[in-house]
Amino acid sequence: MSMIAPVQPAEAPTGAVPGSGWLSGSIQALHDQGRWGWLRENREQLPVAVDELIRFVSPVMHFRRTATQDTELQGQHIRAGDKVVMWYSAANRDPAVFADPHSLDLTRNPNPRLAFGVGPHICLGSHLAKLEMRVMLDDMLSRFSSVEVTGDVERMGSNFINGIHHLPVRVAA
Ligand code: HEM
């Protein structure tokens, strides 16, 4: 059986684009690292695994803020009015925070990932997005003993969303 991962329309509302990037990126990561079978056998780890998958995929790569006052960040002077770009994808692979940051560790806990941002503007839909992801993966793990990426992955050309346009996969019941 073949299945095509959801395509991400450019005009999709907030949440849908990073959500589909997260799901297809997770399927790709689970395939690449050979972790589908393990997660299927250790389903109680799903809430922890979902956090690690969003750290690993980082569907939203950055947001920008404007400094309202002069400040200093790790020795870098920032003046009021400066634009500051926060790279969540880099923060999520920070070796000072995460042991072996480029590895997908589905048992990583605690997992202080910043994939939904931080502070007063933290993603309003983060709980919904995590619930959706858990339900989707849980259902797919119940139905499919394996999910195999069978061809070239067509990535979105974007420095904002780490998304996938096309992910050909073969699933086995
Ligand atoms: C995998 C899915 C998602 C990811 C990775 C994601 C990520 C983010 C990030 C990084 C921010 C910026 C946070 C910041 O500025 O510090 C944000 C903001 C926001 N997100 Fe999401 N999001 C997702 C899904 C959703 C969903 C499903 C909804 C709505 C149902 C949603 C609604 C919002 C809103 C309204 C904001 C702006 C909050 C504010 O400025 O106060 N997001 N999201």
Image: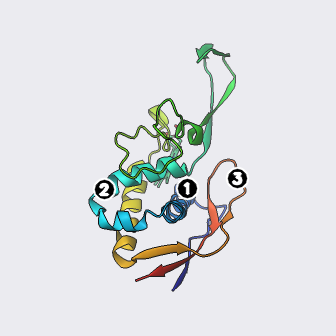
Under mark 3, the amino acid is Ser
Quadrant of the drawing holding the C terminus: bottom left
* Disc ID at residue 158: 3
Which of the two residues, 26 or 78, is positioned nearer the viewer here? 26
Q: Is mark 3 within 8 Å of ligand 1?
A: no
Under mark 1, the amino acid is Pro
Q: Mark 2 or 3, which is nearer the eye? A: 2
* Tag 2 secondary structure: helix
Marked residue nearer the N-terminal end (2 or 3) = 2
Establish if 71 lies above or below 145: above
Marked residue nearer the N-terminal end (1 or 2) = 1
Q: Residue furthest right?
A: 157
Q: Position of residue 166 (x, y in %)?
A: 64, 70
Report the side of 96 relative to 71 (left or right). Answer: left
Does the rendering let one see residue 30? yes
Q: Is mark 1 within 8 Å of ligand 1?
A: yes
* Disc ID at residue 45: 2
Which of the two residues, 108 or 138, is positioned nearer the viewer here? 108
Marked residue nearer the N-terminal end (1 or 3) = 1
* Tag 1 secondary structure: helix
Gap in angstroms between the C-alphas marked 1 and 2: 23 Å
Q: Position of residue 7 (x, y in %)?
A: 61, 69
Q: Residues within 10 Å of mark 3 (few under 14, many from 20)?
A: few
Q: Position of residue 6 (x, y in %)?
A: 56, 70
Q: Mark 1 or 2, which is nearer the eye? A: 2
Under mark 2, the amino acid is Gln
Q: Are marks 2 and 3 in contact (CB under 8 Å)?
A: no
Establish if 121 lies above or below 156: above
Q: Residue at x 30, y 63 (%)?
A: 43
Instruction: Give the number of marks.
Output: 3
Q: Residue at x 50, y 29 (%)?
A: 96
The residue carrying mark 1 is: 18
